[in-house]
Image: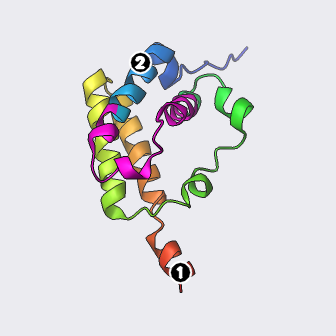
């Protein structure tokens, strides 16, 4: 009888919530000090930290808390009100990659997470959308 091997998720490999909480805190500590990014974020960073934590834990194989509390992520739609160009994207991605390093995400998980954050950051660039709709 063939039994399918159950795969362990990145979330499980990294020990669950604790490391992801540290990752979000490390990322937001950088955002708080960044003169380019800080003005884009609301004054109170706590709600954003909560949603980012719930989203990335779910994305990397943790509980489905984000979708239960907030529904479909719709990342691009949720970020459309913010003007995101390559500089904003690069700052966001660089802070997230630095946070990965700071909290000690090991390989091969770091590379997989890095790829996700780089691709997602790029997909949030919406300068063309804003330029087109302002005319």
Local packing at callout 2 (Cα closer than 10 Å; few below 14, some 14-19, many 20+) is: some
| Residue at image location 41% in from the left, 44% down from the top | 117
Q: Which residue is mark 1?
A: 134
SS at mark 1? loop
**Is any atom of residue 16 visible in this view?**
no
The stretch of residues the image draws in magenta is 29-56
Give the label, 2 or 1, closer to the camera: 1
- Image quadrant assignment for residue 50: top right
**Is any atom of residue 61 visible in this view?**
yes
Q: Which residue is mark 2?
A: 19
| Residue at image location 73% in from the left, 40% down from the top | 71
Q: CA distance from mark 2 to mark 1?
A: 41 Å
Callout 2 touching callout 1 (CB < 8 Å): no
Q: Earlier in the sequence, mark 2 or mark 1?
A: 2
Marker disc for residue 52: none
Vertical order, 42 against 128 (above or below): above
| Residue at image location 30% in from the left, 41% down from the top | 95
Front residue (pair 56, 47): 47
Instruction: Please state the horizontal and vertical placement of residue 47, each as a whole percent of the image.
Output: 55, 33
Instruction: Please state the horizontal and vertical placement of residue 127, each as a whole percent of the image.
Output: 44, 71
Front residue (pair 106, 47): 47
Vertical order, 41 against 3 (above or below): below
Instruction: Please state the horizontal and vertical placement of residue 16, each as a whole percent of the image.
Output: 50, 15
User: Image check: 53 left or right of 32?
Assistant: right
Give the farthest residue toward the bottom.
135
Q: Is residue 36 magenta?
A: yes
Which SS does the magenta portion mostly show?
Answer: helix
């Amino acid at each position: 009888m063939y039994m399918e091997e159950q795969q362990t998720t990145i979330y499980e490999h990294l020990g669950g919530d604790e490391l992801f909480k540290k990752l979000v805190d490390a990322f937001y500590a950088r955002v708080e000090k960044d003169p380019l990014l800080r003005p884009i974020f609301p004054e109170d960073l706590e709600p954003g930290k909560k949603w980012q934590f719930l989203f990335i834990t779910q994305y990397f194989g943790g509980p489905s808390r984000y979708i239960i509390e907030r529904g479909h992520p719709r990342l691009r739609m949720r970020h459309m009100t913010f003007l995101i160009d390559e500089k904003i994207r690069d700052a966001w991605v660089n802070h997230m990659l630095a946070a990965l390093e700071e909290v000690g995400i090991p390989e091969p998980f770091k590379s997989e997470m890095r790829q996700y954050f780089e691709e997602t950051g790029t997909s949030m660039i919406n300068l063309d959308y804003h330029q087109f709709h302002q005319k």
